[in-house]
Amino acid sequence: MKKIIIHIQNNNLIFSYKHNQTVREDLINTNIISDSELIFSDDYILTNKKLVIPFFKELCDMNAIDTLVFQNSKLAIFMIELFKNIKIKKVKIKKEESVPYSFCELLVSLKTITELDCYSIANFILEYLDKHHIKVTTHSEIFYMSPFIQENGLNDYSKMFYKKQIKINHVFTEEDKNDFVTFLKINRYLRVLSFMVYDRENIEFCLQALKDYRFKNVLLELYENISSADDISYLKLLNKKYKKNKFVIDLVYSDEYLSNNIMKQICLNTLRLCGIILVCLLVGTVGYIMASNYFAMQEVTSISDVVADTIDNANEEEIPDTDEEEYPIKNKYIASLLTINPDIVGYLKVNNTNIDYPVVQGQDNQYYLRRNLYQEDDNNGWIYMDYRNSDKILNDNTIIYGHNMYYSGVMFGTLHRALNSYWYTNPENLVIQFDTMYESMSWQIYSIYTIPKTSDYLRVSFKSPEDKMNYISMTKNRSITDFGIEVTSDDYLLTLSTCTGDNERLVVHAKLLENTES
């Protein structure tokens, strides 16, 4: 149990641990104020947060406290969450140490904090705090970086985020371990971890950290000539232990070692066997994919045939009209499809692609991700309009989604053709037909692009004409080519969105060109 001393000085609340002093008898089992000094045990704070938090709030209000001063970052991490709902503007760490990322994560959660005063801080953490509008004052001449950060060039936030391969050239110190954990909290793309030295503790620490932060499919390369049967057995056990996480530990031997080692032939035979197994798996996988794609195409073709038959055989007298006089049904062919699915709101066609489908709309944007036009479970999903859009009155931006079923070509599986110059240089391809039951509409494409996963283009309305023009400029600037199309804040927009990889989106934007009732 540790005693935490709290001083009030001007508008500062100062926290420090009580060391090498005899605790007064009346403070051993209680937590009281004496001579402008408070003493709490850490156990008491942990078990009585509901009492302590209101007490601190009242204390801060009574003394106009706007700054928290901590002896070190460890104490700051322990105490800072107690001040989430208290208007504190500044935090100061007195110890000459580098502030850890874990503390800065907590600091950002205090929405009123605008300033941090500390001895030193890493560049990438400084950048992280700057994005949250927290000014940092340091007192060291240079920013501290651990060997791990320096050797891998991880001196800013973006490099940490996108780094795919990391090298570990030495046994980790505690600072290295802390920074490696920080790296895993930020990174999203790590695929290869290369160990230039063999150390079991290092390897186990990294594997456990990867598991803790839910990384998958990471290759661990060991660049050391390991020949000990005990070490090889140990690595095999690790491979087995972390198999569920899809971590693979691979030994990378030097050419000299391979040429002189007596186990060379055994290794070659093992490689041959692995090659045969890999080919079998590849053939099986390709066969499975081809079969799945074939059945997917058959299923969608069957549904499309039913759609075509329904439109061709519809009896116009049986097609219901709208109850609202201001929205008369003009496209009876779409209304006839309501017998298949009452969620149908329109019909989309994109020239020189396979996109020729009725468009549905669910209560949210999840329902038709895994359901077809019959509302049956189906991994192909269906083409659907954003639940926020209206099919009667056009919003500023109408958004339509669909899966990129690349190999089968169904749904938005052929929209990727729009990225090829032979496609977008053909004027006929640049006019999209999207009809509702109430209007027939042609849309002129003005922007095509791919972008890392984001939601900034998924807006259906805008606050002002200036806001809408900023959106139009953003989407135009992203385009793979300048289509030379003038778009104004008065134009209605159409957006087609699909995935192209796990973390990328393919987006097509168009403006309403004309209303041409067929």
Image (spheres, rainbow, N blue to C red):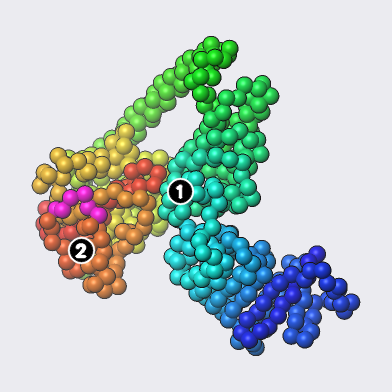
Mark 1 crowd level (few <14, some 14–19, many ≥20, 10 Å Cα): few
Residue annotated with mark 1: 153
Residue range corresponding to the magenta coloring: 478-483
In the picture, the quarter occupied by the N terminus is: bottom right
Q: Which mark is residue 492?
A: 2
Choose top left, top right, bottom left or bottom right for residue 240: top right
Q: Is residue 298 above or below residue 495?
A: above
Q: Secondary structure at mark 1?
A: loop
The three-letter code of the residue at mark 2 reads Tyr
Mark 2 or mark 1: name the one nearer the start of the chain.
1
- Residue visible at 63% across and 24% down in the picture: 232
Q: Position of residue 449 (x, y in %)?
A: 25, 50
Residue 455 pos. (x, y %): 36, 57
Q: Is residue 183 visible?
A: yes
Q: Considering only vertical position in the picture, is 397 above or below 192?
A: below
Queried whether the magenta region covers residue 93, the answer comes back as no
Depth order, front residue of 144/436: 144
